[in-house]
Amino acid sequence: MAMNTTTLRTKVEPRDAESIKEIVASTDFFNQEEIEIAVELVLERLQKGEASGYFFVFADISDSTIGYACFGLTPGTAASADLYWIAVHRDFRGKGVGKLLLQESEKLLGEMGGHRIYIETSSRDLYIPTRQFYLSNHYQLVAQLEDYYAPGDDKCIFVKKI
C-alpha cells in the first residue's frame, strides 16, 4: 500500500519545480498554461519563502516525488484557507496518496489557524473522479458558478470545516 512506502515532507526544494511540472502534466487534466501556473507557485515559494503564502506537502517514494498539495490561508479572511493544487502522478493514482496529501494539508492548515478549507474545480466530466474524491473526504459542494472557466465548464466550490 502506498502509505507504507510514501513519506511526506513540507520543505520545498529547487528540484520540486520540475517534479510538479511532471506530476501535473502526467494527469492529463491540465493545459500548458495551468501547468505553468502550478510551477510558478513553487518558484514563488522558493523565492519568497513563507511570505509567498504558498505552503506545500510532497509525497515521496525514495528520491522521487509522486504527488503534492499546495495550500494557504486566504488573504483578507479571519480563518479561511484554500487548497490550490493537489495532484498525484498518474502511475500512483488510486493508491491512497491523494488522501494522505489532503489529510496532511488539512492538519497543517488547522495548525495555521484555518477553520474552513475551500477547493475549486471544474464541472467537466473529466473531473467527476476529482469531485467524488472531495465528497468522499467530507467536503460539501456549496456553489457552482455557471460557465466560469468556459461555456459549459462551471466552477465547483467545495468546503470543509476543520
Image (cartoon, rainbow, N blue to C red):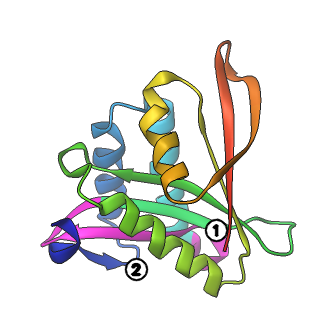
The label number, if any, that marks residue 28 in the structure image: none
- Front tag of 2 and 1: 1
Residue 31 shows up from this direction: no
Left or right: 109 as drawn, with respect to 134: right
Q: Is residue 52 above or below residue 42?
A: below
* Residues rendered magenta in the picture: 48-66
Going 57% across and 59% down the picture, which residue do you hit?
Answer: 138
Q: Is residue 58 above or below residue 137?
A: below
Q: Residue at x 42, y 78 (%)?
A: 10
Q: Which residue corresponds to mark 2?
A: 11
Quarter of the picture holding the C terminus = bottom right
Q: Is residue 132 left or right of residue 7?
A: right
Q: Is residue 98 visible?
A: yes
Determine whether, in the image, residue 12 is placed left or right of residue 76.
left
Residue 72 tag number: 1
Amino acid type, callout 1: Gly
Looking at the rendering, which quadrant does residue 13 occupy?
bottom left
For mark 2, give the secondary structure.
Answer: loop
Q: Note whether 61 is above or below 23 in the view shown.
A: below
Q: Is 78 or 1 nearer to us in this picture? A: 1
Q: Earlier in the sequence, mark 2 or mark 1?
A: 2
Query: In x, y percent, where is residue 61?
Result: 16, 69
